[in-house]
Amino acid sequence: MAERLSAEARKSALKALAGWTEVPDREAIARTFTFRDFNEAFGFMARVALVAEKNDHHPEWCNVYKTVEVVLSTHDAGGVTANDIKLAEAMNAIAGQFGAT
């Protein structure tokens, strides 16, 4: 099982993750991605799904038209782990290919 990051390690990791913030009242990180249209948002989700499945680490997310809201936390560890940071990095890289904000 992955180990939960300390509050200090989590804050340090977030400094390098553009667009990600801590979730109030919960040990999790979140980001909202905005794409040009639904097709791009869905394409982003499909690519992330492949990464998530390969790493057996899945996001909490919601898609409405061109917006994808994501929350990452490792439930087994009770908070944010290195797995969440790696998935957030991958999501940022994938979103960058679409020009998302």
Image (cartoon, rainbow, N blue to C red):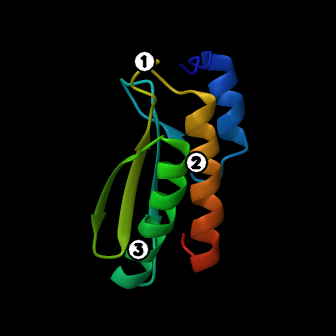
Q: Which of the 4 image quarters holds residue 5?
A: top right
Task: Return the x and y of residue 88 as percentages of the image width and height.
Answer: 58, 48
Residue at horizontal 37 percent and vertical 56 percent from the top? 69
Q: Quick one: which residue is furthest to the left in this view?
A: 64
Residue bearing mark 1: 78
Residue bearing mark 3: 41
Q: What residue type is labelled 3?
A: Ala
Q: Label 3's element? A: helix
Q: Which amino acid does label 2 sit on?
A: Ala
The one of 25 and 39 positioned closer to us in this rendering: 39
Whole-angstrom CA distance, mark 3 to mark 2, is 16 Å
Residue bearing mark 2: 88
Residue at horizontal 44 percent and vertical 80 percent from the top? 40
Residue at horizontal 47 percent and vertical 50 percent from the top? 53
Whole-angstrom CA distance, mark 3 to mark 1, is 29 Å
Dot 3 or dot 2: first in sequence order is: 3
Q: Which of the 4 image quarters holds residue 66?
A: bottom left
Task: Return the x and y of residue 46 as percentages of the image width and height.
Answer: 43, 68
Dot 3 or dot 1: first in sequence order is: 3
Whole-angstrom CA distance, mark 2 to mark 1, is 17 Å
Task: Return the x and y of residue 15 as percentages of the image width and height.
Answer: 70, 40
Q: Quick one: which residue is furthest to the front in this view?
A: 54
